[in-house]
Amino acid sequence: MTGEHLQVVHGDITRLAVDAIVNAANSGLLGGGGVDGAIHGAGGPAIMTACRAIRDAQGGCPTGEAVITTGGLLPAPYVIHAVGPVWRGGGEDEDALLANAYRNSIRLAAEHKLRTVAFPNISTGIYGFPRERAVDIAIGAVREAMAKAPSIEQVTFVCFDDENYRLYRQRLS
């Protein structure tokens, strides 16, 4: 299902052959559960080594920001690690921080002259961000960022679960 240069697929982001997949990372960049654990597991130790080097150089990655590493053993040559916010009820700038995580991922991809990027559902798992709200923020932020990133030809939202897939399909149809 597509709309302009945005599409949604139901599946496993670690299997996508795109220029970069985005990881829903934590600020420590040291792996975790959910999609973060799946990406580190499938990509092998090269991703963790690269994350440690970034952590040593700059002390992690603040919420709303993103960093880029090798994709290791993944089909995607790069992983963009974006740190989304933990949902705390909406009064702590969570919407803006989530939008920034998507915008900064697109900006990094464009700086590296990448053409295709795949996103998971950032912050909607263990971080508890309300899914409908997150979908609207993700699509809006990506559209906005793509307007300033002409090298990006295709963005794929990859949904592991049925609910997020249904929400993205509705919004992009």
Image (cartoon, rainbow, N blue to C red):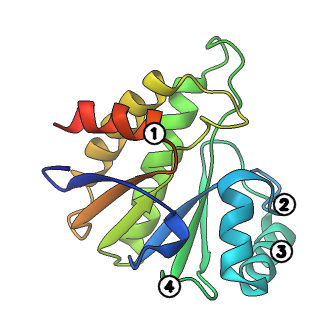
Residue at mark 2 to residue at mark 4: CA–CA distance:
24 Å
Of the numbered discs 4 and 3, the one sitting upstream in the chain is: 3
Residue annotated with mark 1: 162
Residue at mark 4 to residue at mark 3: CA–CA distance:
18 Å
* Res 52 label: 3
Whether residue 152 sits left or right of residue 83 in the image: it is left
Residue annotated with mark 4: 77
For residue 169, which quarter of the picture? Answer: top left
Residue at mark 3 to residue at mark 1: CA–CA distance:
34 Å
| Residue found 62% across the figure and 38% down from its top | 123
Extreme-left residue of the structure: 4
| Residue found 26% across the figure and 44% down from its top | 143
Give the amino acid type for the residue marked by disc 3 in the picture. Arg
| Image depth: mark 3 or mark 1 in front | 1
Give the amino acid type for the residue marked by disc 2 in the picture. Gly
| Image depth: mark 4 or mark 3 in front | 4
The answer to whether mark 2 and mark 3 are in CB contact below 8 A is no
| Image depth: mark 2 or mark 3 in front | 3
Give the amino acid type for the residue marked by disc 1 in the picture. Asp
Give the amino acid type for the residue marked by disc 4 in the picture. Pro
| Residue found 70% across the figure and 59% down from its top | 36
Residue 120 in view of the camera:
yes
Classify 44 as above or below 119. Answer: below
Of the numbered discs 4 and 1, the one sitting upstream in the chain is: 4
| Residue found 79% across the figure and 64% down from its top | 58
| Image depth: mark 2 or mark 1 in front | 1
Residue at mark 4 to residue at mark 1: CA–CA distance:
27 Å
